[in-house]
Image (spheres, grey):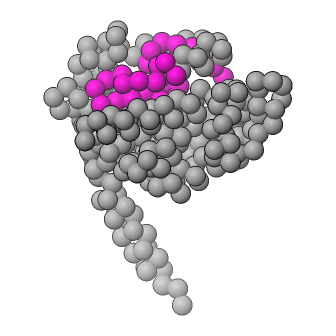
Amino acid sequence: MLDEVTISRAIVSTYLQKLQDHLELDVAIVGGGPSGLVAGYKLAQAGRKVALFERKLSLGGGMWGGGMMMNEIVVQEQAKRILDEFGVPSKEFQPGYHTADSVLCSTTLASKACLAGLTVFNLVSVEDVMVRDSRVTGLVINWSAVEMGGLHVDPLTIRAKWVIDATGHAAEVLGVISRKVDARLLTENGRVMGERSLWADVAETNTLGNTREAFPGVYTAGMCANAVFGSYRMGPVFGGMLLSGEKAAQEVHRRLSEEG
Ligand code: 48F
């Protein structure tokens, strides 16, 4: 016979243990869109202790809706190998343009990342950072429901050696840093520049170059990289997002190895 309170006890104790186990991390990823999921997958595969914090109920970010709610995405030639690596089927539309079902792609990235060892805390929003000696050392988190309800409830904290800001167009982690912390440390211009209008070709190329350490301890990934460094948006072509997540993971992994 099922006991309802045992069900509740199982959930409460398992969740609290999971949270306790992830209060100190190698890498904290903020945002569960395509770039954050690829970064999480790669870092988990590399054996790093990595968790991802996602404000919403579901993972996948802006990928679910394809283009204007038509649930297909386009991925260019250079990034198709990442779809292949995840086992996401794609079709060549014409040379250089591959399409994939956005629901299949979102669910597969999320599933493979979790199976590789990425721990996800959904329904959790990152509202602030901790900075010590001019470097980000952790995140300040709260339930998204608290944020949405505008409730006056103090947050909790996560310590992380590295943070990846994969919050998309809003660039929320670096936005907070630009407002609250010594902005001179942030990018060449001392501010989050904000994304420009839509230009797919240039935006896709810039995304990789803009995937870099934007503030000590914080890497950009995905659309956030272009938003921080003032490049263009690109619409429903996702290769740059996948490649950016991969690059952020590779670089953070390398920096962790160098730091010992
Ligand atoms: O926007 P999103 O999908 O970011 P991305 O990985 O990919 C961008 C593309 O989807 C698309 C595009 C490419 O063609 O332009 O927009 O760069 O996912 C960002 C995720 O971060 C979450 C948000 O709910 C979304 O799922 N997020 C944003 N701010 C926070 C956050 C925050 N403060 N705390 C937790 N999650």
Q: Image quarter for residue 203?
A: top right
Q: Position of residue 104 (x, y in %)?
A: 71, 47
What residue occupies the far top of the structure in this picture? Answer: 189
Give the side of residue 5 with respect to residue 155, left or right: right
Residue appearing at x 40%, y 32% in the figure: 251
The residue closer to the viewer here, 258 or 143, is 258
Q: Residue furthest left?
A: 133
Q: Which residues are magenta?
A: 208-236
Figure quadrant of the C terminus = top left
Q: Quadrant of residue 163?
A: top left
The residue that appears at 36% across and 70% down in the rendered structure is: 13
Q: Is residue 244 above or below residue 204?
A: below
Q: Position of residue 170 (x, y in %)?
A: 48, 26
Can residue 227 be seen here? The reply is no
Position of 76 compared to 7: left or right? right
**Residue found 70% across the figure and 26% down from its top:** 76
Q: 141 or 203, which lies in front?
A: 203
- Asked whether residue 123 is drawn in magenta, I would say no
With respect to residue 100, does 135 lie above or below?
above
Q: Is residue 187 left or right of residue 115?
A: left
Residue 197: give x, y in percent of width and height.
Answer: 60, 11
| Residue positioned 84% across, 25% down in the render | 94
